[in-house]
Amino acid sequence: MPAALRMPEPELIDHAGLDSVVYLRIYLIGLKIFVPITFLAWAILVPVNWTSTGLEGAVINNITSSDIDKLSISNVHSKSERLWAHIIVAYAFTFWTCYVLLKEYGKVASMRLQFLAGEKRRPDQFTVLVRNIPPDPDESVSELVEHFFLVNHPDNYLTHQVVYNANKLAKLVKKKKKLQNWLVYYQNKLDRTSKRPEMKTGFLGLCGTKVDAVDYHTTEIDKLSKEIALERDKVTNDAKSIMPAAFVSFKSRWGAAVCAQTQQTRNPTVWLTEWAPEPRDVYWPNLAIPYVSLTVRRLIMTVAFCFLTFCFMIPIAFVQTLASLDGIEKAAPWLKPLISIPFVKSFIQGFLPGIALKLFLIFLPTILMIMSKFEGFGSISSLERRSASRYYIFNFVNVFLGNILAGSALQQLDSFIHQPANEYPETIGTAIPLKASFFITYIMVDGWAGIAAEVLMLKPLIIYHLKNFFLVKTEKDREEAMDPGSIGFNTGEPRIQLYFLLGLVYAAVTPTVLPFIIIFFGLAYVVFRHQIINVYNQEYESGAAFWPDVHFRVVIALIVSQIVLMGLLTTKKAASSTPFLIALPIVTIWFHRYCKGRFESAFVKFPLQEAMMKDTLERATEPNLNLKGYLQSAYAHPVFKASIDEDDDDEEAYSQKWETESVTVPTKRQSRRNTPLPSRVSGASSPSLPHAEP
């Protein structure tokens, strides 16, 4: 841990990429925002709340107040002048949060531009993904692309690679790899025991005729090789297998930037151009989806996600009810003597609801990722960003609102429909302070214990041993089972955002929550810095393209906190002071629009000035560079490379070409292998990426 904390940021960028470094900065922002806010809240609001007597002998919604509630706004009398302290502090919290976000947005935008300017040569710097190519009865897609770009980009067009629908071929290649793995296993067994291994050909090897395992797998691999060769010919020669999309490469970064960031024809629905993701970031199965069907797919998944969000609340509410004292007494009356023990009672009241909620959410990231893949996004980074966005919405509705408001989401929806819109903040505001103790235990269960589990890597350890026992047959299998994977932006970032939401909402309401959130951000920063350096592998590099989403979600959390405080002041009958808070959401929305206009273009566009500078420098330092040879096969479908036999001369020549053109990035890392790695999903690698070093 100390060594991980000492690594300077530039070295960390070289070692793990900009995505990982900016991901760590989200935790640092949490500390920058909440440490001063906590000091201010405990210096001003806690004494104001504690010295009030609003809760003495009071019972709110049949819930008797605890000592934590005496530190909250609930303890302040209705119409009290003390409520002005909360309004003034809310202004201070808003301006400080906006100041930190503004500085950080500028810093990350500068880091991104500096990273792109100093980055070594990569295929995606010269390449544009073109989609929705209009059909032409007289020309093939490849000829059409070549003619279009020779006419419209005559000085910059270099080469192109059409997109094939090779999904069936990919399945055959995957099946062949699996059979080859089994063959290695049985050959090792034969060498070890000198006895011909046998197997059954039926379901899971449990039934069917008994055959010689080595001969059977050799025969099956030969059959599959012939089938793969036929499918390859079909894919490359059949016009129906060619999709109306292509990766188009240019002679310069400037030419690629002009094409990627402009409209190509007067019809804005055809010849759509965007920056190509780097080769290992491409999610190849989705490129075979017709562009016209993407809108329909996304509409279907939006509806499905709405149903998932609301229907998921029913089992969560059921489990949370069972995890309460009353629920356990009703379900199992014979446990009454046990749950009356003080320690057991405290555990059930404090931790059991949080644990039950955490267990219920285990499978959610997988479900959301499947939904994102169905929507047809063409890169792994965009899949993860989409999944993260939906995970955040789910957390907001089910974890935040769902635990504040009683009953299932469908009951909540029914009650919201039947009450005036101006009562929504009041309904939520009344319930917020009463749930402070639940969220404190949730932060400890999900946050603190989650970070501890991250250090122990218990889940990967258990999965490894299960795979080792049931699935591992060869050393290659064992290495794959030991792969720790990547940091998981689609699950990690939404969780961080939930703590931003809880911290900002409770800062002016119940400051007791804030120290727990600070401890989470501090521990998480230390732990994840270590994990990024020594454990996880980076599967793609998007140059921190996710940062605008992070900024937007913190702004949303800030607006929610302001609306909640307005609702609370309404319940406190502070009608004269509530209008002073209306300015805060307006200022916050204006601030977001300013940041969007000032900085967001750095995350979606590449400045032509920067592109020209890099091109000029490269021409001066490498005048004899064969750029066409470098780019020609960069975006070839990985299945065409994988289906070539490993001992083939073409494959060796292909590997040697990349080895001679790639540059190794030095690193002080002493772990098993370096990051970045070729993607496990796409199977592709970027020519500028370093090879593994001892």
Image: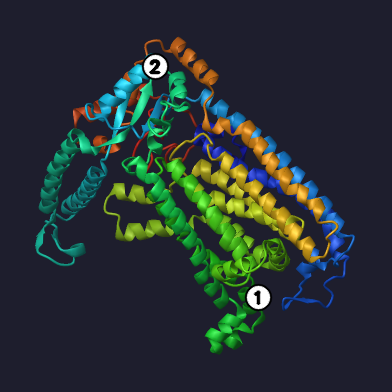
The circle on residue 156 is 2
Instruction: Please report the residue visible at 52 percent of the width from the left and 46 percent of the height from the top.
Output: 531
For the residue carrying disc 1, how many other residues have a C-alpha within 10 Å: few (<14), some (14-19), or many (20+)? some
Between residue 608 and residue 114, name the one nearer to us: 608
Relative side of 450 to 505, left or right: left
Relative side of 207 to 248, left or right: left
- Which callout, 1 or 2, points at the residue further toward the start of the chain? 2
Residue 267 appears in view: yes
Q: Which percent across, then down, holds residue 407?
A: 59, 72
Q: Quadrant of the C terminus?
A: top left
Relative side of 46 to 417, left or right: right
Between residue 593 and residue 321, name the one nearer to us: 593
Label 2 sits on a secondary structure element that is loop
Q: How many marks?
A: 2
The amino acid on which the numbered mark 1 sits, given as a three-letter code, is Ser
Residue 107 appears in view: no
Instruction: Please report the residue visible at 36 percent of the width from the left and 60 percent of the height from the top.
Output: 466
Residue holding disc 1 = 346
Q: Which percent across, then down, holds residue 238?
A: 18, 36
Between residue 227 and residue 515, name the one nearer to us: 227
Q: Which percent across, then down, holds residue 372?
A: 42, 50
The circle on residue 554 is none
Q: Gap in Å between the C-alphas at discs 1 and 2?
A: 70 Å
For the residue carrying disc 2, how many other residues have a C-alpha within 10 Å: few (<14), some (14-19), or many (20+)? some
The amino acid on which the numbered mark 2 sits, given as a three-letter code, is Asn
Q: Quadrant of the N terminus?
A: top right
Instruction: Please report the residue visible at 60 percent of the width from the left and 66 percent of the height from the top.
Output: 417
**Residue 105 appears in which quarter of the rendering?**
top right
Residue at the front extreme, as displayed:
266
Q: Which percent across, then down, holds residue 547?
A: 57, 39
